[in-house]
Amino acid sequence: MINENDAPRIAAEVVARVYERCRARAARPGGKPLDEIINETLYHERRRLARQRGRDEERAFYSGLRHRLGRASEAETQRMLHEIITRYVEEISGHFDPNIYRVATRVMPVGVSALLTGLSPGRLLGSGLLGGGLLGGGPLPSLEQMLEIHGDVETTRRLNELGTVLYVPTHSSNLDSIILGLALYQAGLPPVTYGAGLNLFENRIIGYFMQNLGAYTVDRLKTDPLYRDALKEYSTVVLEYGRPSLFFPGGTRARAGTLETYLKKGLLGTAVAAYRNNLERNRDRRIFVVPVTLNYPLVLEAATLIDDHLQISGQSRYIIVDDEFSQLDRWVAYARGLFALDMHIYVRFGAPLDPFGNPVNEQGESLDPHGRVIDPGRYLMDEGAIVDDETRDAEYTRMLARGVVRSFFANNIACATHVVSFAMLHALYERERPSHLYRFLRSLGPETSLPVDQLLATLQRLLDELGALADDGGIQLGRVVSSRRAEDVLNHAIRRLQTYHTRPVIERRGDRLHVGDANLLLFYRNRLEGYGLLDAPTLVRQRQEAP
Amino acid sequence: MTGKQTRSTARKATPAPVRPTAVQPPPGPHVAVLGAGNWGTTIAHLIASNGNAVRLWTRSSELADAIRTERVNRRYLDGFDLSEHIWPTNDLALAVRGARMIVMVIPSSGFRAVCRQLAPLVEPDQAIVHATKGLEQHTYRRMSQIVLEETCVRRYAVISGPNIAREIMEGKPSGTVVASPFPRLIERVSGLLTGPTFRVYTNDDVAGVELGGALKNIIAIGAGISAGLQLGENTRALLITRGLGEIMRLSLSFGARAETFSGLAGIGDLMVTCASEHSRNFRLGRGLAAGKDVATITAQLGMVAEGVNTVAVAHDFVREHNVYAPVIEAIHAIVHGGQHPIEAIRELMVLDARPDVDLG
């Protein structure tokens, strides 16, 4: 995590680098002149603001800029560019307050537990509990009991000593950032610098905590290439400074409940960039990429996410601000469910990779496909010297992305809710053999039902396949699922699927199981999409990393 | 090294012109070419003719010794004097260690095995370029994917195009395509190969270039059948054009780009293979038309035609992914299902007429 001394230094470094790069490019023959860069910013930013409400200060800034640009001298143009970059970087690096930061880092784990048990931060802060009993493990039920940490934590800890760790988790809920922070704390791993969506900072429930935790903001609505440059540079410099960091490589929460099969390459590419910059300065400080999978038996925002996914494609919203995550009553309901049913949230640390997608051993050494130690620095060399080559590094990043996606699938933890939803939808599919998949999905409703026995048969087949897959390391099984007993898994899942959501996902009436909420059934089922289980058809068309 | 020395002096059947036999390779930077068949030898010669030291690896010590002493590859490329800059060897480590670039020209059936042998010898700053036209059975893997799966090498490229080795050696103007996601590598490969009668074009669609090269072998079998049955030029044009459409549909579902097939590695390679009566695949087709079976023809050819393997792979893929490819299926039925060519053609001719151009 960035500490209070680093923050201004990192920000200054980022501004200087981005600014210098613009000037260097402008000076090249055929390069983009500075006023054109500013015009591009104006175009993108005004387009963004046209679709957003409020933000008067920003509007004023850009219209001022437009007026100045018309009659700007060379020096004035340079000043303006510098202002824009500084503004971007300040937004990215956040309103960092060392005082609040110091409190927040200590309070974070407790604060999170409090949030999940239905306490608002206002009440929490106003309660005066922070300084007292709470920190000593006071009266609140502990979230720690609900968190199950899997994977090779020991290696991850070692790698934090040997180099800089970049965590790239799956993303299914806005809770992820919090759960991950807690998981790192609980596993005794050093805190990280987060890249988190701007919407999270503006969220009225946890924004307060995000603001001051050394997190940086990622505004996915900003399409200006200059902003993206600044964001990537920020992430690069943080890694170069040796600060472990974390961002979600899929970009947004998985709308359909699936695992990410395609990753954003911009931020991911900062791993190789930081490593290269280090090597160029003769510092062989390695960067380790640790894929992390998060699995919830129930997802707080599932209903909103799947509804959004099912909108006619193209109309779905990239950023959702008005979901369950901003509704305190949903938090409370969710937290109650978690505690009442003793639900487990799984966080699994995957095997580490180098920035080129190669596996890394406990000593931090990169390995070839047959386990031989190799020198990753040589990927950046041509005839003995380090060479700058953006196209090459972009291809390396694609290879890394493939490695991360493979890791997501191998480290995904199948929960009972996922498995039962998958079996239920598949049993219905096999019964109907529909010629139109989407018509079939739309036809599912409370009147759709299956005999329990029929589901159990499909479920058992699925559990057997999952067991074989898990034995080969192709997936992980949650506690109940690993028993591989269909009846236990079914009962366990049904209780959970009837709990938090407004409508039960699956409902048991006598010896029949009814579809309560077909959308949510699809959502939970989708966590097992992409494995080819039961030869089921693909229900979610997703962009894939090229093989 | 001593073992090799004794062996080469032990059996010297034909008296070769007396030349100093270098057992240690000449010092300095070099390029490794793996595979001394006719295409591998030709590529080695092209690179060496540009003044680059080339170490040409072949599994056979006899062949290595023969090339070294005679400067001719009698087995695969008889009649052409090879560049003095080619240093043949059967020692893989000696060939690839420190090589600026490694060019693999290994049949697809043995490609993965050689990659595994290569794995402990290569380093992350090396590049592997391959010129193998084929797909791996069962896995549908392209050769570049096998390189990435088996070695630490990340920088890769493919060479493919209408390239009959003998014509290139004769100095007849020819061109090829180098494809890679790494522009600097393309530049280097192109610099090594380009010569007064050999042009190199570039592409970044690796999948398209690899698939164009692999799948055209199937259509070449069809061209051989068509010629064997004396079906004429209309039939050949029908076959090539419909065949190209199938190659494209198949390749698009593998992630290739349609434009690639209008280039040398697509239509270019297809034209040469279907016109050249000497190609193995074409001769296989001719044999099939004459009523022989694959085993008999293979025995007569003395080697397996790549198309035999490729049509099996393509057929599996077509079935699995529901791609419309009746020509490929017909050729598969002839090659692997024992169907008579005339029967297969009759079935093709009664299919519903489809749009002339349809890439869906």
Image (cartoon, helix red, strand yellow):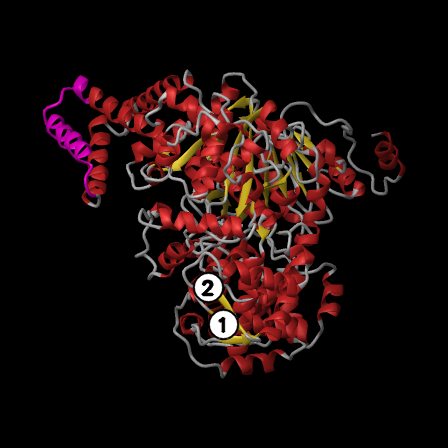
What is the magenta segment's predominant secondary structure? helix
Q: Which residues are magenta?
A: A53-77
* Left or right of B260 on screen, residue B147: right
Above or below — where is B88 with respect to A377? below
Q: Is residue B73 visible?
A: no
* Left or right of B62 on screen, residue A446: left
Task: Give amino acid for label 2.
Answer: Pro
Q: Residues within 10 Å of mark 1 (few under 14, many from 20)?
A: many
Judging depth in this view, the residue of B214 and A325 nearest the camera is: A325
Above or below — where is A310 with respect to A391? below
Q: Residues within 10 Å of mark 2 (few under 14, many from 20)?
A: many
Task: Give amino acid for label 1.
Answer: His
Q: Quadrant of residue A363?
A: top right
SS for dot 2: loop
Task: Measuring from the top left, give residue A51's x and y in whole percent.
Answer: 21, 46
* Left or right of B152 on screen, residue B188: left
Lower sequence index among marks 2 and 1: 2
Discs 2 and 1 lie in a common subunit: yes
SS for dot 1: strand
Image point (10%, 24%), residue name: A71
Label pair 2/1, CB-CB below 8 angstroms: no
Q: Which residue is mark 1?
A: A514
Image point (49%, 72%), residue name: A514
Q: Is residue A59 magenta?
A: yes
- Chain bearing tag 2 is A
Task: Measuring from the top left, give residue A469's x and y in whole percent.
Answer: 66, 56
Task: Measuring from the top left, give residue A538's x and y in whole percent.
Answer: 50, 63
Q: Which residue is mark 2?
A: A504
Above or below — where is A188 with respect to B114? above
